[in-house]
Image: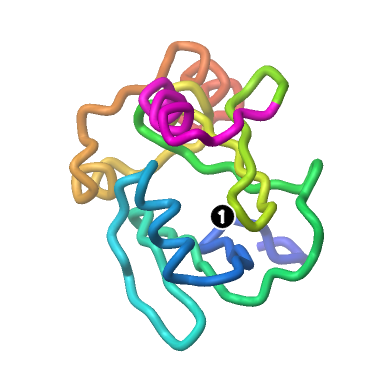
Amino acid sequence: MSARPRLVGVNHVALEVGDVDEALAFYGRFFEFTLRGRVRGMAFLDMGDQFLALGEGRTQPPDDHRHIGLVVDDLEATRRALEEGGVEILPGRGLDFRDPWGNRIQVVDYRGIQFTKAPEILRGMGLDGLEKSERALAELRDKGLV
């Protein structure tokens, strides 16, 4: 074991929103999720072995570069849903948008990135047929992770 602890992952990300019920309605229009739980002023959205926390209290201006990256099983379906929902897709090479409270969200496809869920987690999420692209597998191989 090294002298310093190693970063091993992200358990959750917390986003500040103006109103939790409105945030649940907004995100529910575009993403399928299970509500992990709620406490006063907060809601927790399950993402397998991770979660997204939505908390009331956003007061800062919209984010320009600071963002979170959400991983989905179908990037193009996400793009269509956002466009059909009237959400502005931000300029650039990816799929970025801002929620109504100014949080910048970047969406990436599971198949195309090195981020990997354990097979039993994918199975539990009903995503056991989700395969990595060759490019993502090569990136994982280069790091000795597959």
Seen in the picture, residue 131 relative to 38 is either above or below; the reply is above
The number of numbered discs placed on residues in the rendered structure image is 1
Instruction: Name the magenta segment's main secondary structure.
Output: helix
The picture places residue 134, in percent across and down from the top left corner, at 45, 11
At 66% across and 76% down in the image, what residue appears? 57
**Region in magenta:** 75-90
Q: Nearer the viewer, residue 137 or 16?
A: 16
Locate residue 52 relative to residue 60 in the image: left or right. left
The quadrant of the rendering that contains the C terminus is top left
At 48% across and 21% down in the image, what residue appears? 112
Q: Nearer the viewer, residue 100 or 109?
A: 100
Seen in the picture, residue 74 relative to 35 is either above or below; the reply is above
At 48% across and 71% down in the image, what residue appears? 20
Seen in the picture, residue 134 relative to 139 is either above or below; the reply is above
The picture places residue 89, in percent across and down from the top left corner, at 61, 28
Residue 11 on the magenta span: no
The quadrant of the rendering that contains the N terminus is bottom right
The residue where tag 1 is placed is: 9
Secondary structure, mark 1, is loop
Locate residue 110 relative to residue 139 in the image: left or right. left
Farthest residue to the top: give it: 134
Q: Nearer the viewer, residue 138 or 121?
A: 121
The picture places residue 14, in percent across and down from the top left corner, at 59, 66
Locate residue 120 relative to residue 22 in the image: left or right. left
Q: What's the image's color scheme?
A: rainbow
Q: Tag 1: residue type?
A: Gly
Locate residue 105 relative to residue 133 in the image: left or right. right
At 52% across and 27% down in the image, what residue appears? 113
The picture places residue 128, in percent across and down from the top left corner, at 21, 35
Counting other residues with Cα less than 10 Å from the Cα at mark 1, is it few (<14), some (14-19), or many (20 or more)?
Answer: few
